[in-house]
């Protein structure tokens, strides 16, 4: 397939099929404001260079109304500006912090023992900063326990004694 523009990709039947699957999965409702009477968009949470618009796992997509989609894209652009000078360490730590926030608000399920995927010690340190105010001893416990490398991370085992 020749290089397609993004607009051309969105006109393809492969995208139309994926879009309908995601809208059905989300019950034709905005995932942010829960509206079902506004124009709905299927939002890519991330983009990977060279991938077609439809060539992602379903969990990379979310249904957003037009207003929430615009707001999400504005946040994405603001984040790019804020983080443009961040090191890889800073970004990884921020991801860990964000995962901790998501756990705290219940995005990983109701069970506090549900494992959360932590991909690096840097992510673990961000997690630790959220839950324990940056206690270095706890960050070392996580590192010593071998939590890096994509293993499941169960915070109740490592953060509480």
Image (cartoon, rainbow, N blue to C red):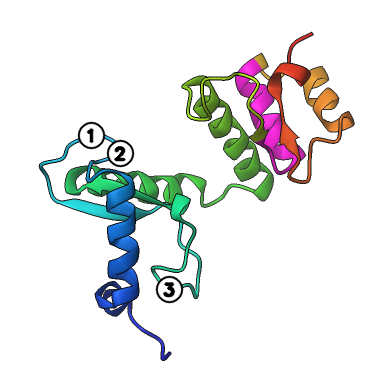
Q: Which residue is mark 2?
A: 31
The answer to which of marks 1 and 3 sits earlier in the sequence is 1
State left or right for residue 75 relative to residue 150.
left
> Is residue 35 positioned above or below 88 on the image?
above
* Mark pair 2, 3: CA separation: 23 Å
Q: Position of residue 45 (x, y in %)?
A: 42, 52
Q: Secondary structure at mark 2?
A: loop
- Crowding near pointer 2: few (<14 within 10 Å), some, many (20+)? some
130 falls in the magenta region:
yes
Label 2 close to label 1 by CB (< 8 Å) = yes
- Crowding near pointer 3: few (<14 within 10 Å), some, many (20+)? some
- Crowding near pointer 1: few (<14 within 10 Å), some, many (20+)? some
Q: Which mark is residue 59?
A: none
Q: Secondary structure at mark 1?
A: loop
Most common SS among magenta residues: helix
Q: Which quadrant holds residue 20?
A: bottom left
Q: Which mark is residue 34?
A: 1
Q: Position of residue 111 (x, y in %)?
A: 57, 20
The answer to which of marks 2 and 3 sits earlier in the sequence is 2
**In the displayed image of the protein, which residue is found farthest to the left?**
37
Q: Which residues are magenta?
A: 117-131
């Amino acid at each position: 397939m020749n290089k397609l523009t993004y607009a051309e990709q969105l006109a393809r039947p492969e995208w139309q099929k994926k879009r309908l699957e995601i809208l059905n999965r989300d019950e034709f409702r905005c995932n942010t404001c829960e509206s079902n009477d506004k124009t709905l968009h299927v939002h890519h949470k991330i983009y990977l260079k060279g991938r077609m618009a439809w060539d992602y796992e379903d969990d990379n997509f979310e249904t957003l109304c037009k207003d929430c989609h615009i707001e999400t894209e504005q946040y994405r652009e603001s984040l790019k500006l804020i983080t443009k000078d961040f090191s890889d360490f800073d970004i990884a730590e921020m991801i860990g912090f964000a995962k901790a926030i998501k756990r705290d608000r219940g995005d990983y399920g109701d069970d506090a023992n549900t494992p959360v995927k932590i991909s690096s010690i840097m992510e673990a340190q961000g997690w630790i900063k959220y839950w324990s105010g940056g206690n270095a001893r706890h960050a070392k416990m996580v590192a010593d326990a071998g939590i890096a490398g994509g293993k499941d991370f169960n915070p109740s085992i490592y953060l509480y004694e």
